[in-house]
Amino acid sequence: MTVVDLEKGAPQDVPRDTSGTATGDTHADTSADTTANTSAGTPLAPPIAFPDVPRRIGGLTRSGVLSLLGAAASGLCVAVLLFGELAPFSGALGFFVTAYLSFLAVYAVLTGLEEDGQAVRDRVMTVVLWTAGGLMFCALALVVGFTAWRGREALPHGNFFTQDMQAAGPLDPLSHGGVAHAMLGTLIMITIALTITVPLGLACAVYLNQIPGRFSRFVRTIVEAMTALPSIVAGLMVYAVWILGLGMQKSGLAAGFAISVMMLPIVIRAADVVLRLVPGTLTEASEALGAPRWRTVWHVVLPTARSGLATAVILGTARGIGETSPVLLTAGFTAALNADPTNGPMVSLPLAVFNFVKSPEPTMIARGFGSAAVLMALVLILFAIARVIGGRGPGHQNKRQARRAARASRRDATRFAELHTPGLELFGTGAGEAPAPGAPAADTGKQSPEDNAPAAADGGPAPQGPPAPAHETRTGGAGGNTDPATGDAH
């Protein structure tokens, strides 16, 4: 609030423009005509408070757009002068970096001509964040577009998705052979890895979140260290234990074990972070109602964090589905279709891409980029499935969930209405029936004179007092008053 003090003396008028607003970005009350009393001893009039105008946070303005365009043109001109006329600079990367830094400096100066320091910092950081987001989007679009463009020769052929490479060679055209064996191998391996990783990862994350202590801190440290574990180390561990130690053969099952080792720390770390975001008031309310810890976790914590847990599983899947070296060490390589994960070698899409693109033949390179495009599409499909399973965040329901919640509410309302139906008494006696011998008399809501009489000091019968007024009745076993006109209890 902007406060204007009035000095003792002549009346103070606040400068106003033609629109009726006070200067200094404050609004004045046009009906206020405050003057100071010049007589001695008279206190001053209270100060007038003008509300501040809030600064606009979002949206585009004309001055903002002009500042952006002018700063961009100035940054480009500065880079051209430095790299072409004034300084012996060279290189495309340096040119763009210099132009961008000059653009930020000029934009900060132009914004400072109209706004304060806080607004200048806000505008500059907004431009920086938009630039970072645009660069990430351009990089993603470049990777996906380049892969799909290079694989455009193999993707239109139907045999590319239905055949394997057992009867096709490097010199065969794209109308022969395909990556069906690699697609099936990837699905089998990632299914085995998810079957192992999801229950173990979520259980470990719940343990780290719900049972704090020295051992949980040790486990969290090990998990954070395993997130940087090289994939070749996981493959060597499974190869040494499963194949060399136990004498098993290379198979898709061994590759699934190696992929699960890579996925497990990612899922645990991400799920632990998500479970920490669940409000503690929800668990406290559940435990206050008498629910045990496991029921609180199963019915409150996990459903609340379901969307975040689906994201954790997606991150782990994206890490494991693109591994190549563990699959090469534990599953081997084959050009034939093998649907048995326990017997014989098996190949995955990343391993097939690696073997295709290292060939000098253009058809094999096209198959490699086509396999990479299929891998990206497979990851996108798994991502969509996980998002559907995960659902929306807490507090957000789709139409089906809203209808189901409404039906449950109606059933509960009907059940509560039946429980509170008038006339259902467990120990009441019918009209005209005498109570059982020795049973206490039924409480009819009337208060007898003996109830109000004080007890005698020697245990004898209490003296009879005056009868209670007719409007005094018992309510709920305690003395109370009832208004005869309205029936309200006091």
Image: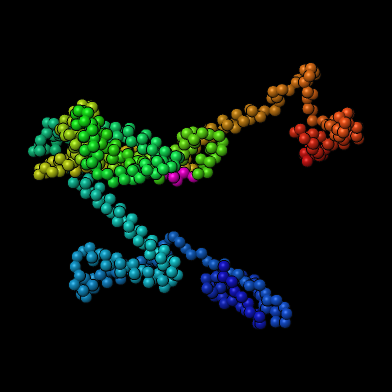
Q: Residue 472, position in %: x, y?
A: 83, 36
Q: Is residue 21 left or right of residue 117?
A: right
Could one spot residue 5 in this view of the protein?
A: yes
**Bounds of the magenta segment:** 274-279
Instruction: Name the image colouring.
Output: rainbow
155 lies above or below 434: below
Which residue is rendered at x = 63% and y = 30% of the image?
Answer: 417
Residue 54: image location, x then y, percent: 51, 64
Q: Which picture quadrant has residue 113? A: bottom left
Q: Which residue ends up furthest to the left in the rendered image?
A: 171
Give 302 or 25, whichever is nearer the viewer: 302
Tell me if I can see residue 349 in this picture: no
Above or below, comparing residue 62 to residue 477 in the picture: below
Q: Position of residue 17 (x, y in %)?
A: 54, 75
Which residue lies at the image location 33% right of the left edge and 32% below the top edge? 195
Q: Quadrant of residue 120?
A: bottom left
Q: Quadrant of the N terminus?
A: bottom right
Locate residue 458, reporting x and y percent.
88, 31
Residue occupying the point 44% across, 38% down? 302
Instruction: Answer whether residue 133 is magenta in the image.
Output: no
On screen, residue 241 versus residue 54, left or right, reads left
Q: Quadrant of residue 119?
A: bottom left
- Name which residue lies at 53% across and 32% down: 408
Residue 277 sits inside the magenta stretch = yes
Q: Nearer the viewer, residue 176 or 355?
A: 355
Q: Is residue 467 left or right of residue 215?
A: right
